[in-house]
Amino acid sequence: MAKHRKSKLDKKMDEIKRKEEAGLLGGESYNRAINKFKNNHLALLGLILFSLILLTSIFAPLISPYKPGTIDVLNRLKAPSLSHVFGTDQLGRDVFTRVLFGGRISILVGLGSALGAAFIGVLIGSYAGYKGSWIDKIFLRISEMFMSFPRMILVLMLVSILGQSLWNLIIIFILTGWGSVYRMVRSQMLSIREEEYVQALRAFGLSDFVIAYKHMLPNAIAPILVNITLSTAMFILQETSLSFLGLGVPLNIATWGNILNVAQDLNVLRENWWIWLPVGLIISIFVFSINFIGDGLRDSTDPSQQG
Amino acid sequence: MNNDNTIISVDNLKTYFYTNERCNKAVNGVSFKIKKGRTLCVVGESGCGKTTLGKTILQLVKATAGEAIYDFEGEKKDLNQLSDKEMMKARKKLQIVFQDPHSSLNPAFTIFGSLQDPLKKFGVKSKAERKKIIGDLLEDVNLRREYMNRYPHEFSGGQRQRIGIARALSVEPELIVCDEAVSALDVSIQAQVLKLLQDLKDKRNLTYLFITHDLSVVEYISDRIAVMYLGKIVELADSDDLYQDTLHPYTEALLSAIPVADLDHKSDRIILKGNVPSPIDPPSGCPFHPRCPKEFAKCSKVIPELKKYIIDGREHYAACHLLDQK
């Protein structure tokens, strides 16, 4: 009887076998990765939240009823209501509008700096880690120089030379941030290059670039993704502290950090929760969503994990 | 010696590694020749420089001194002195199969993805053609051609090792260095892979430099055996001669360690004292003298050279002072 009734699993296996014999399976490793990502509910949730925050920030002028800088002293420190969803701050500015517009800057600074630092770190780290010898030594020393340099002093220096601006901030974050990515990628590459498949590729005389970037890098990608998600959060928060000192983004521009800073005032912290709580939550949700996406990407790019 | 048949002739090859001003003489003056279509087995304990020897010949590790003359269809060239363009040509002739089937395939790529880049480099432009070649290779090593779309973790150790062999074959080499190619496999799979290697050798007229520590494997596959100890060859002979007329005490000790599946067999095993000395700080004189059961005064003072002896009209090389005494 058991012979007649094939279980669902049997049928699935037969289907897979038939496809493989016909040469239909595989080859589409991108599809496979996408499918795996789709099956990862947390990652999907992360992606949805991330896109939601990103899109509302991008389309902030269309969504928000007020202009970000409009001061309305008569309506200062109003609790959330229908006209002001997140209430107003000490100058009577609509907090909801500021959160939307602040997202533009904060996401740009956080994600932009993290991606920029990762790009440079990976670019140099892969090659130097694979080649070793003097190239690696030189970049190791350079990265140590950048990492040991106090970020604040570098910021002060650059701000006094170039003036206070958003792009200077991103450049500084990238300059001080690439070192840690570089060191991480480098150490990964150092261990991967001893694997025999790398030796085999060398025995074929493939170029160093192909070996390092095409064949070795995919095996080092997991910690890089995690690093990007973590440093995005770090950069958003650092922008906050720099803005507080008046060294980051100019204070008249709304950023999540600028908004949150108001909570340094004990009165605001006690009485006016609507100013700092929503933006704090949104920063957390944003960082979470990036983390989930990072995890999902890591799992979906690892072929030995089945989706 | 019939020189025309020699595919590679290694002469006084040395590979030293320098660490903190100390010198690790991993390969310290090795010389041998391999004739086309034959198999030379290099045996020895771990750390004796077998693997470094193989990698040096393939130029994965740079030689410190010495020559490795390869016969490029009549044109003899030193592998250590090739220009980049000539090296490209050499890469097509010499290939390697590795020991560890788990690290010898890239886990992030399908088999096709791993194997196609070398083909691309050697001029197979169209994807369909590469697919066909890789499929054929997989069938040559007794795997199904659909397997090219699978990832390495979907294979067993023996299958992976066969894929490693297929990869080495993909550029149609003449000489393959098998670096402990079957050591990581269990005995039944070992036999399969060895048989495959033997078949491929006959079919494609390959030459093997077979590096192993397993003498039972050697017996099966080798035509000629070189015994290495601390970066030097201590005995070199055709395999039958080496098994029958063992000259060097170290080889005797190695052969006595082969287990025999016979309860009545009374083994007169030679147990060596101590461990292999460090190649960074080798003993004076004969490197084997501190462990040698037949050591005498001269051994600790003079380094013995690899000399030719004629036994029953056949050449047999060994490096031992004892033999000169007789």
Image (cartoon, rainbow, N blue to C red):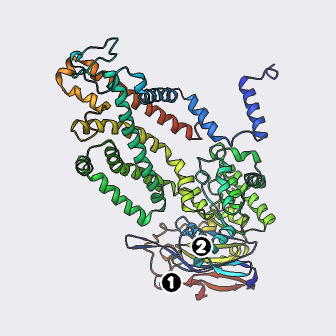
- Tell me the element at label 1: loop
User: Could you tell me which residue is drawn at 42 percent across and 51 percent down?
Assistant: A121
Q: Position of residue B257 (x, y in %)?
A: 61, 64
Left or right side of A185 for A277: left
Left or right side of B68 for A6: right
- Tell me the element at label 2: helix
Q: Which residue is mark 1?
A: B303
Q: Which mark is residue B84?
A: 2
Q: Position of residue B288 (x, y in %)?
A: 51, 75
User: Could you tell me which residue is drawn at 64 percent across and 37 percent down?
Assistant: A31
Q: Amino acid at mark 2?
A: Asp
Residue A230 visible (yes or no): no
Left or right side of B284 for A70: left
Q: Quadrant of the C terminus of chain B?
A: bottom right
Q: Is residue A258 above or below residue A30?
A: above
Disc 2 crowd, CA 10 A, few/some/many (<14, 14-19, 20+): few
Q: Position of residue A242 (x, y in %)?
A: 25, 39
Q: Is residue A125 above or below residue A3?
A: below
